[in-house]
Image (tube, rainbow, N blue to C red):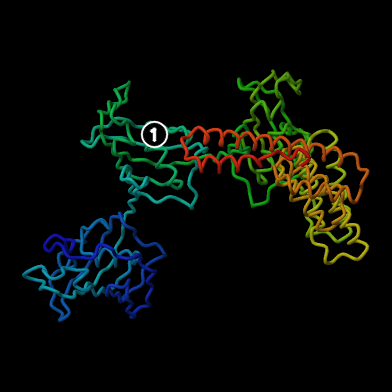
Amino acid sequence: MEDFDIPAGDEMNEDMMDLPDVNPKVGEEKEIGKQGLKKKLVKEGEGWDTPENGDEVEVHYTGTLLDGTQFDSSRERGTPFKFTLGQGQVIKGWDEGIKTMKKGENAIFTIPPELAYGETGSPPQIPANATLQFDVELLTWVSVKDICKDGGIFKKILTAGEKWENPRDPDEVLVKYEARLEDGTLVSKSDGVEFTVREGYFCPALSNAVKTMKKGEKVLLTVKSQYAFGEKGRPASGEEGAVPPNANLEITLELVSWKTVTEVTDDKKVLKKILKEGEGYERPNDGTLVKVKLIGKLQDGTVFLKKGHDEEELFEFKTDNEQVIDGLDRAVMTMKKGEVALVTVAPEYAFGSSESQQELVVVPPNSTVYYEVELESFVKEKESWDMNTQEKIEAAGKKKEEGNLLFKAGKYERASKRYEKAAKYIEYDTSFSEEEKKQAKALKVTCNLNNAACKLKLKDYKQAEKLCTKVLEIDSTSVKALYRRAQAYIQLVDLELAELDIKKALELDPNNRDVKLEYKVLKEKVKEYNKKDAKFYGNMFAKMSKLELPEANKAAVKQETEPMSIDSKA
């Protein structure tokens, strides 16, 4: 305020609590917080957004005492008042009240002295301990965010962006920017540069900022030196100006667009960059029949495969059936109908360490390959909720057989997925007939047992134990379930539980050779752990005997160590 400034009160409670949403109806008055601040709504605002601490707000106001005496008005001056919210530039009641307002809203705030000028007042217009009233209209605000929460980068939105999505670390963004020193000297500029968010460009502030921006958003960044070029600065190079050591920057940044990049595998060796967004939400799953346009390239751009282009019939394959390389298979299952993507596949998910004769050329060993893929259409396998009971049993049986073939081929991870899917088809059997329930029960037992065998091969012992427990809940006399659960317990070093399972299995089938062999493995494990325990305690007591102890204590130690014999029969 130009003629009558409203500074932060000197004697105010700094520990204002977080405020609940305050949405009085027109003409209503509500209390904000618990310190006596009241808000009466005169005119509703637009939308749902309200300003936050750090935002630059613009208001018109009229301030009066409770007796109606006016002491200030921006309306009479004809100039709106601007300030930064939540920074102590105005009285506390303003900071807390205006953050509840929407754009265009008009409200009357009744502010107690504790949130205004307190015991001192602001002579001569405002006496001590005065309760004030402000008729405030929130005209607009500019959002200012402390991006890194450390004051290193402040972002002021100049032009709002579209939708709600923000780029992520793997994505490729296209930006325009101008970077200047605090004195206005231009040091760098681009009318369009593309970079991966994770790798960054120019200075760290750009990648930090774009992750908070929407498409089309334009911002002004105030950047401290630690997010620019730090203590070293940057020398001039070509058309790029020098940045002195410890220099702060002001950067105007516009996020023009970005291409979404998905890390298809956890090890980031299969990446998918979306060139054109697909439609809807559906994506292919295991066993889906897909039709695609496909171009496969080597790193130097050599095309080794071309399908579905130049009026050629679309390339068709079934997912998760080894009809294409693993990386392409996985990537296509993340796509939507109509999506166009560039898929990068490392050798481990492509053709590996051997050369491979493809349609047009030979792919050399250890090649990273690139596919341009357009998913034209796909037909998913029928989901269980669309099947009748007999169809569910037949589908479960088919998946079980597929799992068996994969298990025999040593493809345990893929086999496990088949067994899981089979079990899901028949998971809920309340609508099944008695005969169907018997069939479902037998299938559940077989699929969970076979899946447990997969998990043991994959060294996922915890999951193997859970699957065997599921089987034993259905059939407590399953020797295979007891045997495989004992194997899992041995690997998890839960030897007592392993022994219980083995003994129960031998009670049920005394001549079972596999169970007997596993009992020998268990006994060897027990001996091994007993030896480790003996060594540990032997070392401990040897160290204790070297200490200078009173005779009574030495006798006590001797008595404690003598019974520590090893039970080799355990």
User: Which residue position is annotated with label 1?
Assistant: 191
Q: Is residue 250 left or right of residue 507?
A: left
* Any part of residue 317 in sight: no
Which sits in the foreground, 403 or 169? 403
Q: In percent of the image, x 92 and y 48: which residue is there?
A: 509
For label 1, count other residues whose C-alpha is less than 10 Å away and answer few (under 14), some (14-19) or many (20+): few
Q: In percent of the image, x 65 and y 35: which residue is there?
A: 532
Q: Is residue 289 left or right of residue 238?
A: right
Residue 3 in percent (x, y) is at: 11, 62
Which quarter shows the C terminus? top right
Residue 279 in percent (x, y) is at: 63, 49
**Which element type, helix, strand or loop, lies under badge 1?**
strand
Identity, as a three-letter code, of the amino acid under mark 1:
Asp
Residue 185 in percent (x, y) is at: 24, 32
Q: In percent of the image, x 64 and y 22: which residue is there?
A: 298
Residue 490 in percent (x, y) is at: 74, 41
Q: In percent of the image, x 52 and y 36: which residue is there?
A: 544
Which sits in the foreground, 498 or 71? 498
